Image (spheres, rainbow, N blue to C red):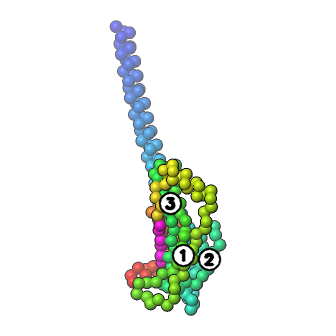
Amino acid sequence: MSLRLVSKRKILWASLAGSAGTSAALVGLFFMLLGLNLHTYTKLTAERVLAKVIVGEKSELGRALMLRIDGKQPIRLDMPGEEWQLDGRFLKWKAWAALLGKTPNVRLERFSSRREKNAQVASEPVIIELIESPGAWISAAMTIAEQLGMVDAYYGSSVYMPLAEGAEFIVSATMSGLIARPSNARAEQAVTEWRYR
């Protein structure tokens, strides 16, 4: 009888210990998945600065402008019009590839002038092509990534802002596209005035 009682206690104790262990494992798995999700969320929403646009004085050819793209020589030009525009192309990875750390890739393609819809056209818009040939090995790698089903979408994105003397803007890449923000007081003032036109 006492052996049977000891045996039942061991079974009961083992069942309780097993249930507690399983519960702890499930709680641990939950927090691990939550951590992975939060890690991905932080990574996918992080912005990456791509360029800075600095607007200078006005001349008869337009506004002096400097475009600084990260890792490249600054581009200086006179830009007619009332606004500047920067265009890019994005490559978005599938969710499972993003979980492995693949963030969207972006390629800046074109920098150009814009006119407001009511402006009289005095000159042709300025268009600067920013694309460089990607090279054979990059094209081959992209073909392989597409065949493995890693690529979710290719899409274009553009930002434009007013040409205002002394204004400086930062252009960043986000998960959803390009975004331009004023980086000094003059740019903030120009955007406020432009917003209500």
Prevailing secondary structure class for the magenta stretch in the rendered image: strand
Q: In this figure, which residue is indicated by the disc labeled 1? A: 111
Query: From this viewpoint, is residue 185 visible?
Result: no
Residue on which the image places disc 3: 91
Tell me where residue 121 appears, x and y as whole percent. Answer: 47, 89
Magenta stretch containing residue 82, yes or no? no
Q: How far apart are marks 2 and 3 (CA)?
A: 25 Å
Q: Taking 160 as reference, is 78 above or below it?
A: below
Amino acid found under the numbered disc labelled 2: Ile
Q: To which residue does mark 2 refer?
A: 75
- Residue 65 at x, y = what percent? 58, 81
Residue range corresponding to the magenta coloring = 156-164
- Residue sitting nearer the eye, 176 or 122: 122
Q: Could you tell which of marks 1 and 2 lies nearer the N-terminus?
A: 2
Image coordinates for residue 114, horizontal then vertical, percent: 48, 81
Query: Residue flagged by tag 3: what amino acid is it?
Result: Leu
Q: For mark 3, give the secondary structure.
A: strand
Q: In this view, does 105 lie to the left or right of 1?
A: right
Choose top left, top right, bottom left or bottom right for residue 192. Answer: bottom left
